[in-house]
Image (cartoon, rainbow, N blue to C red):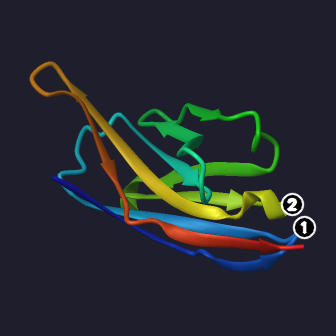
Amino acid sequence: QVELVESGGGLVQAGGSLRLSCAASGSTFSLNSMGWYRQAPGKQREFLASIGSGGTTSYSGSVKGRFTISRDNAKNTVYLQMNSLKPEDTAVYYCNAVRRTVLTGTVNYWGQGTQVTVSS
């Protein structure tokens, strides 16, 4: 089992920045990737960014160039640096971790979410 705890959310003005953190604990060995999603009221959960165990990153078009994902393997922590925030970035942000094995297939782990509110 993997536990994910997000932090760093809050209220920020448009154009500002926030950095989210996600600390992983438990069976963190051989996690294939970690990433970030968000869900705004009335909308589906949306993929934002991911980073593989080797450091390969992937971003959605809506945040590419504004958000940067990184990880500190020694701390089992992944970060999301968010710059040039817009009111439409307002959502609950979730940390995600993925493990794929032949035995279990793909298993997703989720944090509890952290609220980000961007005021205009």
Task: Name the residue at 55% across, 44% down.
Answer: 44
Q: Please state which of residues 50 and 89 is positioned toward the viewer in this rendering.
A: 89
Q: Position of residue 87 (x, y in %)?
A: 82, 64
Badge 1: residue crowd in 10 Å (few <14, some 14–19, many ≥20): some
Q: Tell me if residue 69 can be seen.
A: yes
Badge 2: residue crowd in 10 Å (few <14, some 14–19, many ≥20): some
98 relative to 105 in the view: left or right:
right
Q: Position of residue 81 (x, y in %)?
A: 68, 60
Q: Position of residue 71 (x, y in %)?
A: 51, 52
Q: Please state which of residues 87 and 77 is positioned toward the viewer in this rendering.
A: 87
Q: Residue furthest top?
A: 102
Q: Residue furthest left?
A: 103
Task: Name the residue at 59% across, 54% down.
Answer: 42
Query: Where, quadrant-wise, is the C terminus in this rendering?
Result: bottom right
Residue tagged 1: 15
90 relative to 21 in the view: left or right:
right
Task: Name the residue at 52% across, 39% down.
Answer: 51
Q: Mark 1 or 2 closer to N-term?
A: 1
Residue 38 — which label? none
Report the number of discs. 2
Secondary structure under tag 2 reads loop
CB under 8 Å between discs 1 and 2: yes
Residue 39 higher or lower than 112, as above or below: above
Residue 12 higher or lower than 83, as above or below: below
Q: Tell me if residue 85 can be seen.
A: no
Q: Position of residue 93 (x, y in %)?
A: 55, 60
Q: Residue furthest bottom?
A: 11
Q: Amino acid at mark 1?
A: Gly
Residue tagged 2: 84
Task: Name the residue at 65% across, 68% down.
Answer: 19
17 relative to 2 in the view: left or right:
right
Q: Classify residue 9 by image quadrant.
A: bottom right
